Image (tube, helix red, strand yellow):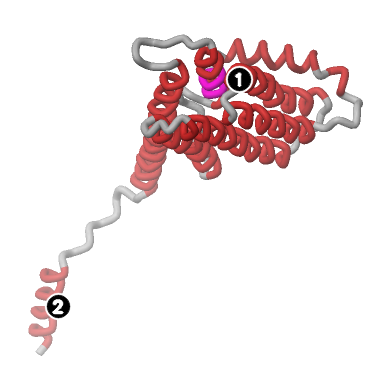
């Protein structure tokens, strides 16, 4: 992820930028939905082959993903539903962008790169799902090399460089960006699964240790069933 200092700087800058809208009728949820609308326009431009304009529009749409949270904090409107809506809209935004890229490749009758798009899409969704599911179960799951901000930057950079006709060896910039996303997102998902598994193991060890410590140490061991039966047999025999 981006460094925490950079994230804090972006938050402070965004909160100052949206401070003028603090008392306006504009709500954070409106910004969230407006960002989705602009993302759809950018994805449509990409699907039509307008990579440069589409990349610029998508970069602009990404700003709303920062402004909605900033406005919520500045206006004191931080609600759980807002966070839920923002996460849901983020998934739609990613899906629309990948759909636009997929249509662009299919229009070129490309057989390989659409597959890479689908792998990157699955990885992007898994990154978010694994985190949400882990947090719902009480685990901490913030690790990973390709969170949403990084994914947005990589896609926009790939689109802009692709529109300039730059090639990296035999690869186009957009292809390189998609390969990075396909590998990086799925690696991030597996990395988060590993971290949650480690946390679960630590919890189980702690529970076993607590159970062992709570068990009485001076409790006599119960006799073995065969020996107990033989003892009862000879006791009964001696009474006859």
Front position among marks 2 and 1: 1
Q: Is residue 144 above or below residue 190?
A: above
Residue at 11% from the left image edge and 80% from the top image edge: 233
Q: Is residue 195 left or right of residue 85?
A: left
> Which image quadrant is residue 15 in?
top right
In what element is the residue under mark 2?
A: helix
Q: What stretch of residues is rendered in magenta?
A: 151-156
In what element is the residue under mark 1?
A: helix
Q: x%, y% of residue 234?
A: 8, 79
Q: Is residue 209 above or below residue 51?
A: below
Q: Is residue 24 above or below residue 212?
A: above
Residue at 69% from the left image edge and 20% from the top image edge: 60
Q: x%, y% of residue 173?
A: 45, 16
Residue at 55% from the left image edge and 43% from the top image edge: 136
**Residue 191 visible in rendering:** no
Mark 2 and mark 1 lie on one chain; the one further toward the N terminus is 1
Q: x%, y% of residue 100?
A: 56, 32
The question of residue 87 being in magenta is answered with no
Give the residue at mark 2. 232
How crowded is the residue under tag 1: few (<14 C-alpha within 10 Å), some, or many (20+)?
Answer: many
Out of 141 and 206, give the one closest to the viewer.
141
Q: Is residue 34 left or right of residue 100?
A: right
Give the residue at mark 1. 55
Inter-mark Cα distance, 2 to 1? 87 Å
**Residue 144 visible in rendering:** yes
């Amino acid at each position: 992820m981006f460094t925490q200092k950079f994230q804090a700087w972006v938050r402070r800058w965004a909160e100052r930028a949206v401070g003028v809208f603090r008392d306006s009728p504009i709500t954070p949820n409106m910004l969230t939905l407006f960002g989705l609308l602009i993302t759809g326009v950018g994805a449509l431009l990409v699907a039509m082959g307008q990579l440069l304009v589409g990349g610029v529009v998508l970069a602009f749409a990404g700003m709303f993903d920062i402004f909605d949270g900033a406005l919520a904090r500045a206006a004191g409107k931080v609600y759980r539903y807002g966070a839920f809506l923002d996460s849901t809209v983020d998934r739609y935004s990613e899906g629309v962008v990948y759909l636009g890229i997929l249509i662009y490749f299919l229009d070129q009758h490309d057989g390989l790169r659409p597959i890479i798009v689908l792998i990157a899409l699955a990885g992007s969704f898994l990154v978010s799902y694994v985190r949400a599911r882990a947090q719902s179960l009480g685990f901490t799951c913030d690790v990973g090399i390709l969170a949403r901000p990084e994914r947005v930057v990589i896609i926009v950079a790939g689109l802009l460089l692709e529109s300039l006709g730059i090639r990296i060896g035999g690869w186009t910039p957009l292809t390189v960006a998609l390969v990075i996303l396909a590998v990086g997102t799925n690696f991030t998902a597996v990395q988060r699964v590993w971290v949650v598994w480690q946390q679960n193991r630590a919890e189980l060890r702690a529970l076993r240790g607590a159970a062992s410590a709570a068990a009485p140490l001076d409790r006599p061991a119960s006799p073995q069933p065969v020996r107990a039966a033989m003892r009862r047999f000879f006791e009964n025999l001696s009474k006859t």
